[in-house]
Every structure is written in structure tokens, then in C-alpha cells.
Image (cartoon, helix red, strand yellow):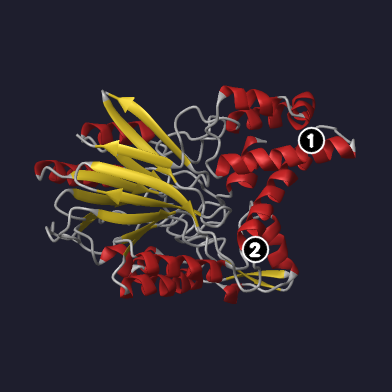
Amino acid sequence: MKKRLAFILLSVIAITTAIVYFGKETEQSEERLFKKDAIEFWVVSDPHYIDKSLTDTGLAFKKIKQTAAGKELDYQKESWQAFIGKAIEQKPDMLVITGDLTLNGEKISAEKLAEQLKQLTKEGIKVFVIPGNHDVNDGWARRFVEEKQEKTESISIADFKEIFADFGYQNAMNYDKNSLSYSVAVNQTYNFLFLDSNIYPDDKQPQTRPTTGGTIRGKTMKWVKNQLEIAKQEKKKTLVFVHHNVFAHNKLLSSGFVLNNAKEFKQLLVDYQVPIVFSGHIHAQDIMSETIDEHQLTEIASSSFSIAPQGYGVVNLKNDSFEYQKLENAHSVSEIKEYPQYIKERFIKDGEHLGYSQLIDAGLSDSKDLDIAAEFVGRVNYRFFSGNDFITDKEVEKIKAETGYQIISKNSTFLKEYIDSIIQDTNQNDNRLKKNFD
């Protein structure tokens, strides 16, 4: 049942792929992207882009949309174009995308997204990407034609590096020959590490069975340590970007989302005084901090750009200061004027569907009670995924006094357990963060 809930809510149909050697490890380069001290970069995760050429209005695509965990799949091109237009207008120095660029690893989707991203690089905005568990050798890459799903070409490791060559790899200071990880010298104060945390099969073939979990493999871990040691010797700070989570952002569901070797990886980051890690994967906007050996490590997990409210992070970074704010990609598309409301309603309805299915399975048949409880689930679920669950104990009491919560408590132990796990974030505000680095 928990596996089923993880699939419905977090929509992570994992990929597996092969580790292939794609080139010699480059010599360490000291070339920096920027000579200035203050930079601004934007962070996006899990866009799950699917190109329009792979879809139609047929039954097969409609079924996929019904099981897409609230993802908006019809107007992604228009939505991305609006976001890119905003970036060109506001001119951040960089855009970072922390994995799951494509819906299920369709090569044409990656190519078309890359074409859009080139608009940014032409305007002098640097773009950096890492693969997520949906991006490479995914056996679920499909084209949807009327009532049929047809296999379409998936992305190999070599394809990924070629398609996104302009978005990280050509600007890399160094890259790991055992994965799609690389490092970048941003300026005189900061290095960024972009890490590939995906688990690859030994048989070197795409697999259809979802594998959501991630790890920092042994050889890659050694490479990370080497990069951190170089930064330490240069007296530079390092920020890390990875798809899978370092912390458990939901106490009920962490398996498959948190790195398999998170404890070891966290200790390495602490040993080298890494202050911030950016991730995605869980689709929920959440910021967590943990103090280990007197060092505070903070992880910012970005929500999925394919679901409401299409959040993205804006980071202003200076020598010793860090400021993060989550903003929303509010805009209209030609077909739907009130697009933000449209995608919000879509995501809430997915949460309501979860409420109905769980309560009906539990034996509840009263239609009025079902409607009240389902509406409650959709509303609370949206609060969690959009990062608006940092509330007071008094607000929690008020929510738990609602009829919807009472109906759930009486009829579904499992659904109550889930609601209790998302109703309140007691760690810290998920949409803003300011830090001063020593």
C-alpha cells in the first residue's frame, strides 16, 4: 500500500541504465565562469518534459494523464517558453535543473527541451543540468498514438552528454569518468558540484521496472571527495546539486527518495563544510537543516516544475551570504488564460482521487462524507507539495477539527497516517532561507 501511495503522490517512475565510459577525466581547470563576487542563479527540478510530437488526444495519452500524479502534460512547451522569457527579461547568471528533465527518458523530449534552453545561453545565461531517474535508458519511453503506446527512442548516457553538452559539460572544471557528474568553478569563492545519483543496471540495457532509488557510487564518492579537497585547498566553498534527497522530507515515505548511502554522503559533506545541497525527486518543496559534528547542513528540495504551482528557486550568492526564495511561474497560455488556476485544480483533483480511492477501499460509502474527506485530502496535499505546511500548532488543531479530517480518522488508518505526516512541517520555512557562511 505504501508503494502504491508513493507512486500516486510522488510520481517517480524510475529509470535504470548502464554505466559506460564516455571520455577521459579532464585535467583540473582553474577557469572561472564569473569574475564578479555576487551572482544570481535560478533552480528548477523535475520538469518531466514530453514533446508534443509524442502525444495526441487519443485514449492512450488520456490514460497517462490520469496516472501522472497531477503533472500538467498538455502545455509544457508554452509554459517553458513563458519561463524562459521571464529569465531572459530578468537575466539571472545561471539556471540549474536538478534532474528528471523528461517524462520517461524520451530522446526527442530531451532534444526539444535543449532547443528551448539554448535561448538562454544565447542571451549569456549559463544553464546546468544533471540527470534524474527518468532521464537515461528508460524502458518506459513511449509515444502515444490513439489507443496505443509505442516504444520510442530513449536517451543513452552518450546521448545525454551530447544533447546537453552546452548545459554543463563544456563548462566543467572536471568530470567523473564513472558517472554524469561534473564540477564547475563558478567564481573566486564558489565551486559547484553537479552529481549523478542514479542507479544503473549491470546488463547495460534499458529496463521497464521502475527503480526510484539513488546512490553516490563508490568511485564517484572518491571523485567527490577529491573535488571537495581541491576546493578546501583553494579556500573555496562548495554547493552541491543532486537529484535524490539527502534528508527524509516525509517521515512516512523515504525509501526510494533518500540516497541509499545518505549517511556516508552527508558525513563527507560535513567533513568538508558544505553548507547547502539542492535536490528534487520528491516533488515537494521542502527545506531541512541538520547539525552534524557542529556543522549545519541544509538541503533545499525543489518541487516539480510539472505540477502546480510551478515553483522555482531564486538564489543570490555573495562571498559569505546566501539568500533563497521560492517563486512561482504564474502566467497564462493561449489556450487557457487562467493557467495557474488550471494546473492547481488539476493537482488538487489528483489528491482528491487519492482520498476517494483510499476511503472507498476502506469501506466508506456515504457520498457526502466521501466528498468532504476527498476535498480535505486534495487541499492538504497541495499545501504540502507547494511548501506551505510550515504552520503553528494552533493551526494544526484547527485543521484536525475539520469534518474531513474526522471522517478520515474514523475510516482509514493508512490515509490518516499519511495526512498526519504532511499536515505540519516543524523544521523550517520551506520557501525562504538566508544564511551567512563563516
Residue 416 image position (x, y, % from top left): 69, 28
Which sits earlier in the primary sequence, circle 1 or circle 2? 2
Neighbor class of circle 2 (other Cα within 10 Å; few <14, some 14-19, many 20+) is few
Q: Is residue 82 above or below residue 240?
A: below
Residue at the spot of label 1: 359
Whole-angstrom CA distance, mark 1 to mark 2, is 32 Å
Neighbor class of circle 1 (other Cα within 10 Å; few <14, some 14-19, many 20+) is many
Q: Which mark is residue 338?
A: 2
Q: Nearer the viewer, residue 106 or 234?
A: 234
Q: Is residue 362 left or right of residue 150?
A: right
Q: Is residue 294 above or below residue 29?
A: above
Q: Is residue 395 left or right of residue 431?
A: right
Looking at the rendered structure, the kind of residue marked 2 is Glu
Can residue 141 be seen? yes
Give the residue displayed 55% in from the left and 57% down from the top. Answer: 306
Residue 210 image position (x, y, % from top left): 55, 50
Can residue 22 be seen? no
Residue 236 image position (x, y, % from top left): 15, 45
Give the residue displayed 50% in from the left and 48% down from the top. Answer: 303
Residue 125 image position (x, y, % from top left): 31, 67
The quadrant the C terminus occupies is top left
Q: Secondary structure at mark 2?
A: loop
Q: Which mark is residue 218?
A: none
Q: In the current view of this chain or complex, which residue is farthest to the right? A: 366
Looking at the rendered structure, the kind of residue marked 1 is Leu
Q: Nearer the viewer, residue 195 or 315?
A: 315
Q: In the current view of this chain or complex, which residue is farthest to the left? A: 233
